[in-house]
Image (cartoon, rainbow, N blue to C red):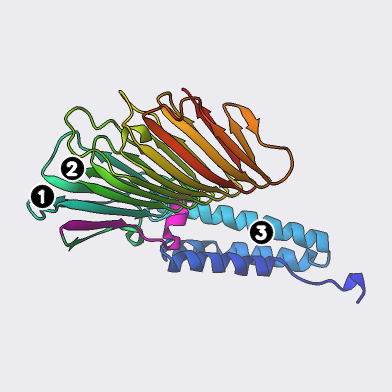
Amino acid sequence: MASGGYRRDIVGPVLLILAGILLLMNTTGMLPWAIWGELVRFWPVLIILWGIGIIFGQSRAIGWALGSAALIGVVALVVWTIGSMGSGGFAEFGSEPKLRQSFSVSSSEYDPAAVRLTVDVAAADTYITAAPAATGQIVSAEAKYHTEASKPVLSKMMVGSTLELRYATSKTPHSFWPLVWNGKDVHRLELGRPDLPTALDLSVAAGRIEAELGRTAVTDVTITVGGGTALARFASPGDGAALGYGRRLKFDVGAGTVDISGIGNTQITSVDGDVGSGTAKLDFGYEGSPAARRIEGRLEVGAGTLVVNVPRGIGLALVADVGAGSVYVNGSKQGGRSVGSSVTWESPDYYSAGSTLRLTVHVGAGKIEVNTGR
């Protein structure tokens, strides 16, 4: 076929694609159906674009230029139209969430011996705090969200003497659009019984979780992160604390970030973690003096980065199998330069310290940074 025979019109396909995108956003609740009534007022623009495409569509270069101009123009028109609607459009997502919901689990309703709280959020920002003293609520929560589809649900069930609580949000595409326009849903939870043994299972996809656990008697912590961020802080149990903390910490990071500090304030004796391409930071800092115990850590690092900070008073033994990655201790690279090596390192006080940490790490193409004596 001769090159002069090119007659394909790109304006029409571009408009069809945009129409399909708008319909998808309508059906998923991202945009109101009323937008079509607003856009109909500008129907002569479509005729103009189509006519220009017919006149100049003989040229491939001009056709693509017209297609790009049509795409930019129609997108600008849609954005302007939604903004002029005042509600239900992009402007709403970029502002404070309009919908509210409160939850509470009262001590008068349940009298458990322990609590297991599961928090599973998608692209929202979630903040978990602990009350400084016991309140009448075991857990209270306040949610601010943009669409009904992202409304959270709090489920409750007694399993033996343990109260199982699950606070979860939708994982459908509804949560994606506020992320683009910097208008995330916000959830705030408070643990109102610091004396009650509490296990936490925290999960976030593309959002953020911040857990300031204070002096709550946390028994176990599991953190799962996709591409988001999770931060957890343990405080000292304080004088006269009868329950202290639990003994197991587990985390799994995909492409996101996990930052856990104050581990030395806990009674944790087991740390298990898996880092994909993201970053994990473990800080074993403490207030006062560390509890005498032996901590065993088993960590897997793929292509990501693991940072471990171990303060004075905690002896460290590190055993690492390294593929194409690297291991640094106090800024110095350990092991050979070739692919595939083993690293063994011990701090001078490992056999004399009352509290010790033994890390067994498998590293693929990632990086480990260990800092001691700080």
Please tell me whether residue 276 is drawn above or below residue 267 in the rendered image: below
In the picture of the structure, the residue carrying the numbered disc 3 is 70
Q: Residue at x 10, y 44 (%)?
A: 136
Which dot marks residue 107?
A: 1
Q: Is there CB contact under 8 Å for labels 2 and 1? A: yes
Say whether residue 262 is visible.
no
Which residue of the protein is positioned furthest toward the left in this rendering?
108
Looking at the rendered structure, the kind of residue marked 3 is Ala
Looking at the rendered structure, the kind of residue marked 1 is Ser
In the image, the segment drawn in magenta is 161-179
Q: Position of residue 322 (x, y in %)?
A: 63, 45
In the picture of the structure, the residue carrying the numbered disc 2 is 192
Q: Residue at x 27, y 43 (%)?
A: 218
Badge 2 or badge 1: first in the primary sequence? 1
Query: Quadrant of the image for the N terminus?
Result: bottom right
Badge 1 or badge 3: first in the primary sequence? 3
